Amino acid sequence: MAIPPLTPQAITILEKRYLRRDPQGEVLESPEEMFWRVAKNIAETERFYGNQTASEELSEIFFQMMASLNFLPNSPCLMNAGRDLQQLAACFVLPVEDSLDSIFETVKQTALIHQSGGGTGFSFSRLRPKDDTVQSTGGMASGPVSFMRVFNMATEVIKQGGTRRGANMGVLRVDHPDILEFITIKKSLKEMENFNLSVGITKAFMEALAKDDEYDLINPRTKQPVRHLKAREVLEAIVSAAWETGDPGILFLDRINEANPTPDLGEIESTNPCGEVPLLPYEPCVLGSINLLNMLKEENGKWEVDFDKLRMTVRNAVHFLDNVIDMNQYPLPQISQMAKGNRKIGLGVMGLAHFLIRLEIPYNSQKALEVVKGIMSFIQYQAREQSMESAEKRGVFPNFKGSIYDRPGGMRLRNATLTTIAPTGTLSLLANCSSGIEPLFGIQYTRRALEDMEFQIMDPLFVELGEKKGFMNPELINALSEGISLQELSQVPKEMKKLFITTFEIPPVWHIKIQAAFQEYTDNAVSKTINFPRTATKDEVKEAFLMAYQERCKGITIYRSGSKPSQVLACGTKQVC
């Protein structure tokens, strides 16, 4: 099978961050050798289960799946598999208990994880509020936000394994007495630069909001209410901060815990940095994404889904990710125990926008929602079938007893979770497809990658179809590079304008509907940014937050263009975005 050529951007990124180097920094492997390194390493797991002969055959399958860009595992797996570090998980959640010992132990653990290339999530909700008593000293507590600054600074000084800056998620429950300080912290530009923030929303808060009532703030040390706030005023504070800075997002904690597969092990209080994996303390997650653009076949000049190829890719990807759990060198023994106890994996997709364009379906359409539900339900079904087959051979996940599957007629799964929708920022650049489940950001735009790289991107599918249909010319390219919207250009056919609609031209309602459609068939959660144009109002942001709850999303992140001094994606000069 011929391997598709990588784009110049992909080669630049691989050379800069992923390929093996010698002590002098010289690149020692080609992209093809990298894929073989990873494939052989992950196929080694077969030997643990007494299957000596399967390893070679499987490494060929894994190699083809990655080198064809049909599936890519998360970045730490590509970077570290088959190398000394061998840390293959993308993200972790660590506990933060209400004592100095626990807090600084977690700071140390965070440093080890960031050094190994992982990101971390924390809930600070167990820390006593500011000015609460500290019995051992008779002093006053400084509160969760001050300790978050310690974590932020620790992240600042550690460059992750020489590959990428550490990322964190900080969560505080909406009923914590310091919630208003937490909500507004990122209004100061230099605060918490290494953190995404999310407010943990409770059912009690949503009920108070519906009644336009007050709700209790509870001191986590005493578990007693200390005062009340008006739910509407707190929501308005969240909306205002998110409109101004992009933070905080919100997590619907009750909904997350309704789907917690192992409730006997505790309550889920936080997620990974991009919000797509709700995890218990010390749980890691191993992620990978299928390139939907490659799951199509052309029949009589029309594109359609190649379900046989998708089925095989899902099954091989689940096998791959399950093997990663055994091959991983975890940064802490507690993480190893949780990883092998629950065997959580997160298989998702990338390239959705391109996939829909190929099928001639506008992103913001009822047809898109139907297709999304069909595809994701198929992926989830196949993933579960593969996990059940693995469970027959290798056993169910060790913490199966007491899990939500441990009931008459329940599925006997190898993995407590199987599906996740990750953002795939860098992976989608490697695969030359649209990122995650996002719409196209622009037809021509500037894309930053890995902090120190910047690419000018002209959408490859637009170029292909423009040349095929004969409307591509230097004037059009020039207009797009100046940031003029496709919708304003008369030479572009109407149906192309509908298909190549970009993120700020799509009403937030459709962003949320797409997120909810994926969530319906996703075990973990969905990373999706609800993009707003610069001109959006606070009321529009509030409507989006409320709609996300109604649509049964597990959380929501919004971003109003221009609300941060620098952003990963930027349009041309004239386009309002």
Image (tube, grey):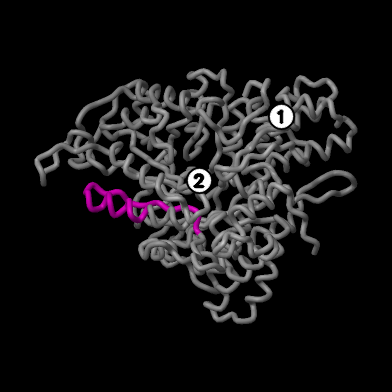
* Residue identified by numbered label 1: 501
Q: Secondary structure at mark 2?
A: loop
Viewer-proximal residue among 570 and 418 = 570
Q: Residues within 10 Å of mark 1 (few under 14, many from 20)?
A: many
Q: Indicate the amino acid at tag 1.
A: Ile
Q: Earlier in the sequence, mark 2 or mark 1?
A: 2
Q: Give the image location of residue 490, x and y in percent.
A: 83, 20
Residue 143 belongs to magenta span? no
Counting labels gives: 2
Q: What whole-number distance in Å separates the C-alpha atoms at marks 2 and 1?
A: 25 Å
If the image is split into quadrants, where does the C terminus sit? top right
Q: Give the image location of residue 337, x and y in percent.
A: 39, 65
Q: Are marks 2 and 1 in contact (CB under 8 Å)?
A: no
Q: Secondary structure at mark 1?
A: loop
Residue at left offset 54%, top offset 26% = 560
Residue 104 belongs to magenta span? yes
Residue 535 visible in the current orientation: yes
Residue numbers of the magenta segment:
89-110
Viewer-proximal residue among 89 and 231 = 89
Q: Residue furthest front?
A: 24
Q: Indicate the amino acid at tag 2.
A: Glu
Q: Is residue 412 above or below residue 572?
A: below
Q: Is residue 366 above or below residue 378?
A: above
In the rendered structure, find residue 276 and report the number of the disc placed on it.
Answer: 2
Q: Is residue 153 left or right of residue 50?
A: left
